[in-house]
Amino acid sequence: MKKYILIFVFGLAYTKCNAQIAFMDTIAHALKGERRAYIGFHNRNTFILSERTRLFGVVGGFDFNEQVKLYAGLYGFGQADETLLTGRLGLTTDTAYRFTSTSNFSLGIDYDFFEWNRISLSVPLQVGIGNVSYDYTKIDRRTPIRTNNFRVVPIETGINAYYELLPWAGIRAGLGYRLNIGKKEVRRLSSPYYNLGLSILLKPLYHDIREAFAE
């Protein structure tokens, strides 16, 4: 019996290793293919401290062989999240406001694993580094009490769907999870997200504009 269990375990391990090798070979092959620069505008609709909060981002990078994207991005709150606090220890007043803001720089990869007509599905992975800030003010929202800053390492993954509107532009939507690594005050900001964004391919856009002016 133990012999069959060992055979089964080694079989699973062998299959997994082959799948990983095939996956890496696919990425390596794509990176040798055609390269196109692109920019994108992303947002992350998350729930920070039980409140819906929108994180905005702008990214830029290269699309390799229309299968693998490598990019860098900057993200931050469009507006600081505001929370009314009452009876909190450590504050100089019984009632205060806490404003939560964050920003980060990220590097990412997006791997397309399915295509059909104008629709494609992909798995993104982003790792970044940034800052989370908690600003405490008195009830008038103007008189500062204190500010706490923390380093954050956000890791994001999920699944994206892309619909091609034009040869040089499309809509991207997705679901995922944003994991914030850091101190307790940072980890509490980890949450699921959904996103909606616009992607623009610069080279095809440039060709279309040049042809339009040439006519």
Image (cartoon, grey):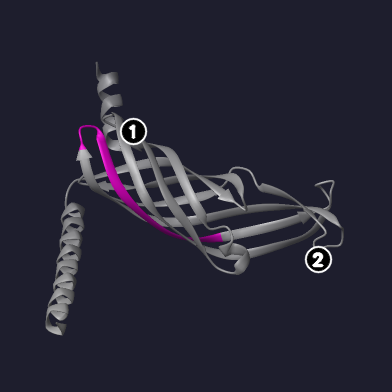
Query: What residue would you read off at disc 1?
Result: 170
Q: Quick one: 36 or 141, which is closer to the camera?
A: 141
Find residue 95 and report its horizontal and vertical position in percent.
84, 54
Q: Which residues are magenta?
A: 116-130
Look at the numbered disc 1 and give the secondary structure of its residue: strand
Find residue 144 and report its horizontal and vertical position in percent.
81, 55
Above or below for 1 versus 213? below
Query: What residue would you read off at disc 2?
Result: 89
Above or below for 3 versus 41? below
Above or below for 38 versus 48? above
Amino acid bearing label 2: Leu
List the single residue furthest toward the bottom: 2
Residue 66 visible in the shown view: no
Q: Is residue 87 left or right of residue 117?
A: right
Amino acid bearing label 1: Gly
Find residue 209 and report its horizontal and vertical position in percent.
30, 25
Q: Quick one: 70 or 97, which is closer to the camera?
A: 97
Question: Which residue is at a point 56% across and 64% down the rendered structure image?
Answer: 187
The quarter holding residue 26 reads bottom left
Q: Which mark is residue 158?
A: none
Q: Is residue 153 magenta?
A: no
Task: Please name which of the two marks, 1 or 2, marks the residue nearer to the observer.
Answer: 2
Q: Is residue 64 left or right of residue 171?
A: left
Q: Is residue 66 left or right of residue 88?
A: left
For the C terminus, the quadrant is top left
Q: Quick one: 23 or 215, which is closer to the camera?
A: 23
Residue 145 visible in the shown view: yes
List the single residue furthest toward the top: 215
